[in-house]
Image (spheres, rainbow, N blue to C red):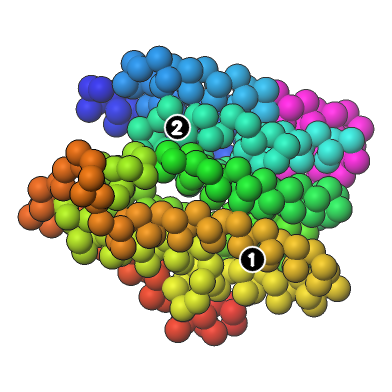
Amino acid sequence: MNPQAKLVFIFSLLLGTTTTITSNHWIMAWAGLEINTLSILPLISKSHHPRAIEAATKYFLTQATASALVLFSSMTNAWHTGQWDITQMTHPTSCLILTSAIAMKLGMVPFHFWFPEVLQGSPLTTGLLLSTIMKLPPITLLFMTHHSLNPTLLTCMAIMSAALGGWMGLNQTQVRKVLAFSSISHLGWMTIILSFNPKLTLLNFYLYTLMTLSIFLTLNTIKVLKLSTLITSWTKAPSLSAMLLLTLLSLAGLPPPKGFLPKWLIIQELTKQNMAPMATMISLFSLLGLYFYLRLAYCATITLPPHTTNHMKQWHSHKPASTLIAISAIASTMLLPISPMISAIL
């Protein structure tokens, strides 16, 4: 792709995201979502591969439907209350439609079918954008309307997302699909706490973004798309493979890496809200995700290539890892000691 064109699309992406997260009017928020969708489509389909074109088409149809539902819910609310302000979403039907629309935009269960397919058809860098910055505007809209949304519906969708994200990721051999189901599972953790402590939702999203950034950039550096390639990649960049192991364990929520913090705080808050059964369920479902994170970590660092097949070890790369990978990997694994400060802020 032409570098100038890529710069225009990335700038439009940032513009759309900024427009949505800073707006108070529903029409402005909807316009930002539309700019976001239109600017990411060329980045998904830039390889001109049939799978990439299919992914772009699926993404466009899903996001267009979700944006139409967002507009419809805001118009219904304005019809009944006379309010176009995002924080004044009070009509029950409008809130129900809005919840469905944002769940479709985020790829939450039961509207999750498009997300693994789109991520599988996209390059790793575009997959990183789809998993992180493209989720920021819908998460912001959820944050701004959390007081109006139905807590029971959000809890049910969150439990289903955590369960389905864990189950469907178990037998995947494509790394991008594993990360897609990981994203669906993490959305469950973000959504279950939204009605009780929305700041924890944002904290979880920020830390998830940090860990996903590190993993996608590492995979892009060592050029890995499936588990069979990951098994032979340890000779190419041993230090990156070691950091990938730690970041995957952080994403799984194991202590002492940083990913343990949001799960710990969410379980603590759910217990305070007399929702211990829900906390237990979502914790058990996260064990499913732990299996495929450990599987990725095992393939990345512990497994040697089998000597009975024609696997070739990759040449050792002497090119230094980028500073962004180093910073994101350290931030996503070694910041647990400052957890008391984060808890005090929340």
Q: Nearer the viewer, residue 258 or 134?
A: 258
Q: Earlier in the sequence, mark 1 or mark 2?
A: 2
Quarter the N terminus occupies? top left
Left or right position of 309 against 187: left
User: What's the residue type where badge 2 is placed?
Assistant: Gln
Instruction: Check if residue 76 falls in the magenta segment.
Output: yes
Label 1 sits on a secondary structure element that is: helix
Instruction: Check if residue 200 falls in the magenta segment.
Output: no
In which quarter of the view is residue 80 placed?
A: top right
Does any portion of residue 132 appear in the rendered image?
yes
Does any portion of residue 146 appear in the rendered image?
no
> Residue 120: which numbered mark, if any?
2
> Residue 200: which numbered mark, if any?
1
- Above or below for 154 versus 51: below
Left or right position of 179 against 80: left
User: What's the residue type where badge 1 is placed?
Assistant: Leu
Residue 69 percent coordinates (x, y): 74, 27
Residue that appears at 68% across and 66% down: 283
Residue 336 percent coordinates (x, y): 46, 78
Principal SS element in the magenta part?
helix
Q: Residue furthest front?
A: 308
Residue 342 percent coordinates (x, y): 54, 77
Mark 1 surroundings within 10 Å by alpha-carbon count, few (fewer than 14), some (14 through 19), many (20 or more): many
Quarter the C terminus occupies? bottom right
In which quarter of the view is residue 204 placed?
A: bottom right
Left or right position of 232 against 85: left
Q: Which residues are magenta?
A: 68-92
Of tags 1 and 2, which is closer to the observer? 2
Residue that appears at 73% across and 73% down: 269
Residue that appears at 50% across and 76% down: 255
Residue that appears at 22% across and 27% down: 3
Q: Nearer the viewer, residue 51 or 331?
A: 51
